[in-house]
Image (cartoon, helix red, strand yellow):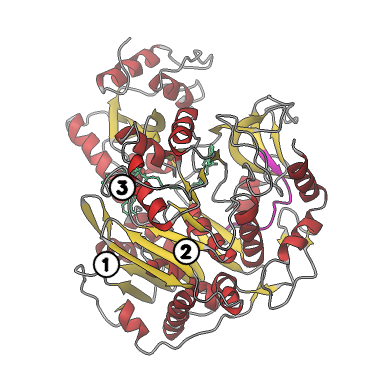
Amino acid sequence: MSDKFSKIYDLSIKDPEKFWQEAANDIFWFKKPTKILNKSNPPFYKWYEDGVTNTCYNALDFHIDQGKGDKTALIYDSPITGNKSKFTYEELRSKVSKFAGALKDQGINKGDRVIIYMPMIPEAVVAMLACARIGAIHSVVFGGFASNELASRIDDSKAKLLVTASCGFEPGRTVEYKPLVDDAIKQAQHKISKMILFQRKDHEVKLNAPMEISWDEAHANAKDTDCVEMNSNEFAYILYTSGTTGTPKGIVRDIGGHIVALKWTMKNIYNIDADDIWWSASDIGWIVGHSYIVYAPLFKGCTTVLFEGKPVGTPDAGAFWKIISDYKVKSLFTAPTAFRAIKKEDPEGKFFSKYDLSKFESLFLAGERADPDTIKWAENLLKVPVIDHWWQTETSWAISSNCTGIEMMKTKYGSACKAVPGYDVKIIKSDQTLAKPNEMGDIVVKLPLPPGTFPTLWNADQRYKENYMSNYEGYYQTYDAGHIDEDGYIWIMSRTDDIINVAGHRLSTGAIEEVLSEHQSVAECAVLGIADKLKGQLPIGLIVLKAGVDKDNETITKECVQMVRDKIGPVAAFKVAIVIKRLPKTRSGKILRGTIRKIADSVEYKMPPTIDDPAILDEIKEDLIKNNILKSA
Ligand code: COA
Ligand code: AMP
C-alpha cells in the first residue's frame, strides 16, 4: 500500500472519530457538533448527534456567503428536447428559495415527506433542494418505475405532497407522467393531499384543482424562504431500493453525516476542486444521481451537469463527448453499460475524434461490474484513467475506489480497487471465519459504518437490524461476494441475494416473480438474470403453467411481459418469458436458480446432489435453445 493513502486510510479505521471530526470542519454548521459518534446502541450509530446544520445551506447559501454567487452551479443540457440552460449559485438559490415557499404554502413543514417523480429537468433539482431547505424529507422515484411501484412508495413514506411533470422523454416515445401518477394515487391506501405538476412546453396536461396545481400556480404567492436549522440526525431523504422481496426498502440518509462525507469524497475520491466542472451521467432517481448529480458537487461548490439524454441515440454515440467538450468537463461518472452502449455503436470511436476533450482527466464507473474489455476500450480511446469503484444505495458513496485526490493507485482490471477511508472491509467465509487474502466469501464492513451511510430504514429499525446487521455480528452485510487480494484490492464477483443488475439498475428477481405469479395461468415461476453484452444482466422468466390451461403459450408469455412492464415498469427490461414443463428443485422443494442461470450463461455446472430429477436440466436446456437464449452445442 502506498504511503500517503495508507496513512489516511489507517487513521480513518483506527480513530474514526478524529478522522470524521476533522472532515466535519469543512462544512457549515449552525451549531458545530461536540459529540462525534454515539456508539451506545449498536447497530444504530449516530454521527454528529448534537450538530445543527442544513443540507440546502451547504449546497447553495454557503458558497454565496463566500462570494461565489455568480459561479455556475448547474448546467442543464437536454439533447432530447434541444434545451440548454445554466444557473449560477445565486440563481439556483433564488429558484429553490421560492419553491421552498411554495411548498410551505401547501402546508409542507419539517419532517413531512414529499415524493418527487420527475424527468431530468432543473425543476427536479430545485424540488429536492427546496425540500432540504425547509427540512422536508424527499423521496425521489425514478421515472421508469410503474404506478404500482410509485404507489408502494407513497404508502410506505406516507407522503403529503407529490411533485411531478407532465411528461418525460425517452428516445422515440413520450412518457406521460400524469396517467401514471393518477393510477398510483388511486392504488395507494395513503392519500396525498396535493400534487404540484410542472407543465413541459407543448405537453401541458389538464389538472384538477384544487388538489392538483401547476408549478407556476404553486409559485403565485410564494415568498423567499430561508433554510431551517436541522439536527444532524434528522433525515434528509428516503430512497427506496430493491430488497429481496417485492416490498422496497426505504434507505434513509441523516443530514450531518451526508454533507460531511459527500463533500469529503469530491476531493479525496474524485480529485474535484471548487473550480472544476463535474458530470455524473445517471438519473436523479438513483443513488448516483442523488449523491453525484445533486448533492456532492454542490456541497463542494463546483459546477454539475444535468443531462437529459442517453449515451446513444440522442442523437448519436458522440453525445457524451459533446457534453464533455462543450462544458470542459474534468471528470465523468457513469455506469459501465453506458460505455458498452457507445462501444457497440461506435467501436472505433469515430465520433470521439470530432471533439476536444483536452480538459477531461478521468472516468469513474460504478453501479455494476466493469468488465475489463470495456475499461480497456475506454482507456484506449480517452487516454485518461478509467476507475471502477464499488458502492450501493445503502452507503451513498463509494466503499472501494481509487482515491485519486489522495494518491493515484495502479489499476487491476476487474477489481474495484481498495477500501475507501472510513470502510473497514472484510471477507467472511461460509464457516463464519475471516478469509485470508484471495479467499472468496461474503463482503462485509465492520461497524460502525462511516458518516453518510444509512443509519436505519424508514420506519423499519427491525428490518434494518435483521436484514443487514445480524448474519455477521458487528458487521454490515453488503450482499456482495468476492475476495480481497494480497495488495488489498477488492474483487466484487456476485450478489448473494436475488438482486440483479440491469443496465446499472438494481432489480429484485423476487419482485418480478411476485408479478408473474399473479398471472392466472401461472402455477410457479423462476426469474433469473442472464448475462447480457450490453446491459450486464437481463431478467428472463421461466414459467410453469397450471394444469388444464387452454390459452396458447404465446398469449400467456406476452401477457406476462406486459404485466411486469405495468407493475414494475419499463426499467425492468423484462422482455422474455418462456413456458417450461417443470422447474428443477431440490428434494426439499427449493428452485435451483443458480444452476439454471449457469445453464443459460453456458457456464459449467455441477449436477446438484440434492436435485429431485436430473433430467429436468436437459429439458430446460432444450427450452432455452428453442427460445434462442442458448445456442445448440
Ligand atoms: N422514464 C421512463 N422510462 C424510462 C426511463 C425514465 N426515466 N429510463 C429508462 N426508461 C425505459 C426505457 O425507455 C426503456 O423502455 P423500452 O423498453 O420501452 O425501450 C426501458 O426503461 C429500459 O431502459 P434502459 O435499461 O435504460 O435501456 P435503454 O435501452 O433505454 O438504454 C442504456 C440503455 C445503456 C443506453 C441506458 O441504460 C444508460 O444510459 N445507462 C447508463 C447510465 C445509467 O442510467 N446509470 C444508472 C445508475 S449509475
Ligand atoms: P445500487 O444500490 O443500485 O447502487 O446497486 C448496488 C449494487 O451494484 C452492489 O451491491 C453491487 O452488486 C453492484 N455494484 C455497484 N458497483 C459495482 C462495481 N464497481 N463492481 C461490481 N458491482 C458493483
Q: Residue at x 76, y 48 (%)?
A: 8
Q: Looking at the rendered structure, which numbered label has been put on residue 139? A: 2
Q: Which residues are magenta?
A: 444-457
Q: Measured from the top left, where is residue 236 in percent x and y?
A: 57, 67
- Residue 166, placed above or below residue 292: below
Q: CA distance from mark 1 to mark 2?
A: 19 Å
The first of marks 2 and 3 along the sequence is 2
Tell me the quadrant of the picture where the N terminus can be found: top right
Looking at the image, residue 381 lies above or below residue 264:
above
Q: Disc 2 and disc 3: Cα gap in Å? A: 20 Å
Specify whether residue 449 is painted magenta: yes
Which residue is rendered at x = 23% and y = 40% of the image? Answer: 559
Q: Residue 516 lies in what quarter of the image?
A: top left
Q: Secondary structure at mark 1?
A: loop
Along the viewing direction, whichever of 305 and 58 lies nearer the viewer: 305
Contact between marks 1 and 2 (CB within 8 A): the answer is: no
Disc 2, SS? strand
Q: Where residue 36 appears, x then y in whole percent?
A: 77, 64
